[in-house]
Image (spheres, rainbow, N blue to C red):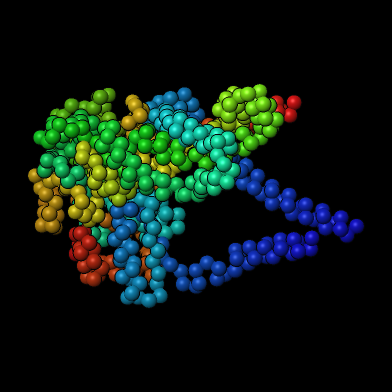
Amino acid sequence: MKEATKDKCISLILLTVAMSAISGLAVITAFIFKEGLPIMFKVGLGKFLFSSDWYPHEGSFGIFPMIIGSLAVTIGAMLIGGSLGLGCAIVLTQFCPPRLAALLKPCIELLAGIPSVVYGFIGVVILVPLIAEHLGGPGLSVLAASVVLGVMVLPTVTSISVDAIQAVPRAYREGSIALGATQWQTTHMVILKAAWSGIVAAIILGMGRAVGETMAVIMVAGNTLDLPGGILDPVRTLTSNIALEMGYAAGEHRQALFATGVTLFVIIMALNILALTVSRRRTRRVGA
Amino acid sequence: MKWIVGLFLAVAAAMLYVSFCPWGRGSGKHAINCVGSTSVQPFAEMLSQEFDLLHTGQMVDVQGGGSTAGIQAVSENIAEIGMCSRSLKDEEASKFTGIPIAMDGLALVVHKSNTVNGLTRVQVRDIFRGAITNWRQVGGEDLPIWLITREEGSGTREAFVKLVMEAGAKIASKAPAGPAGNKHVANRIYRKAMTQESNGAVKELVKHDRGAIGYMSLGLVKDELKILAVDGVYPSLENVTTKRYPLMRPFLYVVRGTPSKGAQAFIDFTLSPPGQHLLVKEGLISVR
């Protein structure tokens, strides 16, 4: 009897702790939607999302260039970070002596521990002048932001891909080798195929990280209000728009920044849901 | 089991204690918050350090955030003193008192290797609204101009818009209007301008980019950049002191109503001969 009450008590406390985290999320969601939605409808959803005039003092709020900016930077980051991350995952699980892998994997994961402002700083001091000198343009560019973000998403993509590859049943691999396939044939024809949905989920989660990153991007992307014409042009992303102007904004301008946040929120939620569905499909298929 | 419950209770008790205990935040003496312009911030920090040495007991906390944010903080009672790097707007002047603490020049800065020595305000305006895009057009090398501006709401940016974009428009009243032909557009800063969020970031970029032009607080430019003459007047100490240099703006402390005793002491110190001497030594112009 007494033990039962104690159990109940503890589960109640744990439930409260868990609920407080979730209610935090709920409050944040409710708040940004409450602050951001009115201006979206006042300006008109189409105009807000697809106009490229962002002049807060004149009351014109169009975030199209920033949506494109975020997308461009994210796609660039995934091309770099995704391919490198997948490469790392394949090497770590297939071609690397286990002892070396045990050393390399934590090293890659350490990248996640470097603060983003440090990435940004290195980007500004080393990468940006390098791009300006050898490729032209102002240096601050989609390319610079993509490279910096690519390195930043590397640990996410690598560790989730490694998990996905390791989850492939041993029998697949052994069967393939036994049939006479080489190690590379086994890897790309059997293992990667079986782990594909997990790898896709890794890439989508990496994208979520890239879309949401702010500090490093502000420092290397240039933050113009114009649509980028190429990868050497500077851009402003949704996150940098909020961070740059948050301190000053009042009234409608502030609401418009919240509306930028709503757009970002929807994009990241969509990516996360996509990642969840894809990885769930994997578990069902492997389970079957 | 028991120890888990005990641990929970201990943590909860500790949290309650910290959040409610009266001397939890800053023991007794309260610090004066001084919030606002990132242009004024380094000078205010220096003043607060000196102030600390003189009057033991009264602490001054200096934070950045931007001129508009500073005024907002004063109106919301978060800060007692706001720092502002532009003159107050009419609606602000009716609610707050602005105390000029120094005058600062707005310096137009370019890369050391730039061959252009000076521009007129009309030329600067044309450059920043995108009508002039190559240094050749103003007598320099054949090199594209990269504009570097500050974010919306920065005092430095607002001072620049007022002193260059609007004043330049008046001088060149017969100048052709911008692409869309209306008055607003003519004074807009070009959307291809890259936005940086502090004087330091502007400086860092201009230092590394041969085609760049930016504007920043004169007091913060050191030797790494080339300063341009405006309307034929170079911002030398003499020209700035006599206010012949056209781009001058006040640095203000902004307060609401009568400041507290501690805040008044800090303001008095700033305006006293040693305080002013400190500002002059760092490149500002005394208001005395």
Visible residue check, residue B263: yes
The mark tally for this picture is 0
Q: Position of residue A170 (x, y in %)?
A: 68, 33
Could you tell me which residue is drawn at 50 percent across and 72 percent down?
Answer: B27
Towards the viewer: A118 or A38: A118
Q: Quadrant of residue A173?
A: top right
Could you tell me which residue is drawn at 29 percent across and 53 percent down?
Answer: B39
Q: Position of residue B57 (x, y in %)?
A: 40, 75
Residue, far right: A1
- Position of the C terminus of chain A, as image quadrant, is top right
Could you tell me which residue is drawn at 80 percent across and 56 percent down?
Answer: A9
Q: Is residue B240 left or right of residue A2?
A: left
- Position of the N terminus of chain A, as image quadrant, is bottom right
Above or below — where is A116 with respect to B251? above
Q: Quadrant of residue B133?
A: top left
Q: Position of residue B231 (x, y in %)?
A: 11, 43
Q: Is residue B145 left or right of residue A197?
A: left
Towards the viewer: A146 or B187: A146
